[in-house]
């Protein structure tokens, strides 16, 4: 039993060693796989010595059955592992080969495009493109044939590069639907699509030219139609010394190169027309430049007038500021007198006044103070324009501000017979500019009185919960709540 296990282990290890050696050229890692192969050989030789001793009847040495079973399993797994790795490396090698081909074709396309840009003559363009295809693309031969419009539909070679040595002189190609026209070149011209001869040795359509092609070392070829403006001008033919040398991506790039070549030929043939168009364009450009110059002059004149207007506006703005300052001073002087004399009367310095008189005088006093504050705000216009508005933040009771605004407009409310309802959360303290908030409330309330002919005016303040954006009436915090959280109030004035 153990003899069979040893023999099988030796066989598997030698098999793994051979498989490892075959991976050396595929992977390019000579040292690594050489060491692996050598290690497997030494392992097989070690078990070979044990096997020979057992077969020769040496009873002094008895190998461990369990250890040999483990070694057999390891050998089996190594063979399986290497057999699974090998296809991966083969596929990787094939992919690298295809990528190299595509990269060569891409470089050839790029350099041919540069040649298209620099070429001045059609012949130079065609020969230059063929040279680049052979030199950069690494192909065996490249040639261009024009599709003649004669009775025989001849394909005439006009440019070539690479290993040719009289090959084009010996072939007779047409693009007619005959035996001489069913090869890659004639078929590509007729169909307008790329045609590939993957194996010249076995391709039946290549039979008329097979002997000459094999003599020159050509194994595969591709013919690419040169189409411009819907017309097939001819075909670009590329030959390789390897069979099946053109993959789909490579053919796609070469076909694009053929299209670019056809476009370049048309461009060179129409050079005269282009030069004439450039001349006419130059005339139109000169005319346009004159128009632009004239328009620029007009714009400069308008810009100058605009600058003068801006200067005038600045002067008017300065005069406006002076006027506001002067008028504010003239208005503040009598207002101060009103405030002063009203204060004297309220203090009883001119004699006793009854409650109704006191109530009316307090309204006069409050309104005069408010008007004085507004005049002060007018004086601050220059500060507003300069971005230096002073905001006086203080903490105050909202209810007092509302009542002060209502007191100022109560006569108008009473005269129109309107009902006034105030709904405010109790003990609502705000921290902002009191004077500006009072002015906002006065503006809202004044508009409500002005545009309400009959009915009721209602003033409410509600709390806005920032987390949900839902409005709800603010309630007094309960005793089990901690510090007051910040609140946002949205004043609501309805009529």
Image (tube, helix red, strand yellow):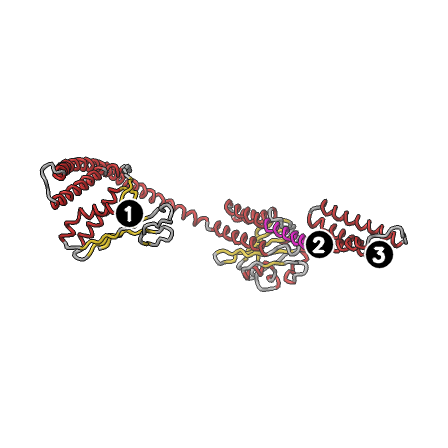
Which part of the image, by quadrant, shows the N terminus? bottom right
Provide residue 424's location: percent of width, then percent of height.
26, 51
Query: Within 10 angstroms of label 2, few (less than 14), some, or many (20 or more) residues?
Result: few
What is the CA distance from the residue labelled 2 to the residue labelled 1? 85 Å
Query: Which is nearer the eye, 397 or 414?
Result: 397
At mark 3, the secondary structure is helix
Whether tag 2 and tag 3 are in contact, CB under 8 A, the answer is: no
At mark 1, the secondary structure is loop
Provide residue 274's location: percent of width, then percent of height.
43, 48
Image check: 467 left or right of 349?
right
Provide residue 254's location: percent of width, then percent of height.
56, 53
- Snapshot quadrant of residue 471: bottom left
- First in sequence, mark 2 or 1: give its number: 2
Rendered view: 382 above or below 414: above
- Snapshot quadrant of residue 12: bottom right
Give the labeled residue for mark 2: 81
Give the numbered dot on residue 3. 3
| Residue 277 part of the magenta-drawn span | no
Residue 308 in sight in this render: no
Image check: 61 left or right of 410?
right
Give the numbered dot on residue 427. 1
Image check: 365 left or right of 148?
left
- First in sequence, mark 3 or 1: give its number: 3
At mark 2, the secondary structure is helix
Query: Which is nearer the eye, 396 or 8?
Result: 396
| Residue at the (88%, 55%) spot, across then down | 55
């Amino acid at each position: 039993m153990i003899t069979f296990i040893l023999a099988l282990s030796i066989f598997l290890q030698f098999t793994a060693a051979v498989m490892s050696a075959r991976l050396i050229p595929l992977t390019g890692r000579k040292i690594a796989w050489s060491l692996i192969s050598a290690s497997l050989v030494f392992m097989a030789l070690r078990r070979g010595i044990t096997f020979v001793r057992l077969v020769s009847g040496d009873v002094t040495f008895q190998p461990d059955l369990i250890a040999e079973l483990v070694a057999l399993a390891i050998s089996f797994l190594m063979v399986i592992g290497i057999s699974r790795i090998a296809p991966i490396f083969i596929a990787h090698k094939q992919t690298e080969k295809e990528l190299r081909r595509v990269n060569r074709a891409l470089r050839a396309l790029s350099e041919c495009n540069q040649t298209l840009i620099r070429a001045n003559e059609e012949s130079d363009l065609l020969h230059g493109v063929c040279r680049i295809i052979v030199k950069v693309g690494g192909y065996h031969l490249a040639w261009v044939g024009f599709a003649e419009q004669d009775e025989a539909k001849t394909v005439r070679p006009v440019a070539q590069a690479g290993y040719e040595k009289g090959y084009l002189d010996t072939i007779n190609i047409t693009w007619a639907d005959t035996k001489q026209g069913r090869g890659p070149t004639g078929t590509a011209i007729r169909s307008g699509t790329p045609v590939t001869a993957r194996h010249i040795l076995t391709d039946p359509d290549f039979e008329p030219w097979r002997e000459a092609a094999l003599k020159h070392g050509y194994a595969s070829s591709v013919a690419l139609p040169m189409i411009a403006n819907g017309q097939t001008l001819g075909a670009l033919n590329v030959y390789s010394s390897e069979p099946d040398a053109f993959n789909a991506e490579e053919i796609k790039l070469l076909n694009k190169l053929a299209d670019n070549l056809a476009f370049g030929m048309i461009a060179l043939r129409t050079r005269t027309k282009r030069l004439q168009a450039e001349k006419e364009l130059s005339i139109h450009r000169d005319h346009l430049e004159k128009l632009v110059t004239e328009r620029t002059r007009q714009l400069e004149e308008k810009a100058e007038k605009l600058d003068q207007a801006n200067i005038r506006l600045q002067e008017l703005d300065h005069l406006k500021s002076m006027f506001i300052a002067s008028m504010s001073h003239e208005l503040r002087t009598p207002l101060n007198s009103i405030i002063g004399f009203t204060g004297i009367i309220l203090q009883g310095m001119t004699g006793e006044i009854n409650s109704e008189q006191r109530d009316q005088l307090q309204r006069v006093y409050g309104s005069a103070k408010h008007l004085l504050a507004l005049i002060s705000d007018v004086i601050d216009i220059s500060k507003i324009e300069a971005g230096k508005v002073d905001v006086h933040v203080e903490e105050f009771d909202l209810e007092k501000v509302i009542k002060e605004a209502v007191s100022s407009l109560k006569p108008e409310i009473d005269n129109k017979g309107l009902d006034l309802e105030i709904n405010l959360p109790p003990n609502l303290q705000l921290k902002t500019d009191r004077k500006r908030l009072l002015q906002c409330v006065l503006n809202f309330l004044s508009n409500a009185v002005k545009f309400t002919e009959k009915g009721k005016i209602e003033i409410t303040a509600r709390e806005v919960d920032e987390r949900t954006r839902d409005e709800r009436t603010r309630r007094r915090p309960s005793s089990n709540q901690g510090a007051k959280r910040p609140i946002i109030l949205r004043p609501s004035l309805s009529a």
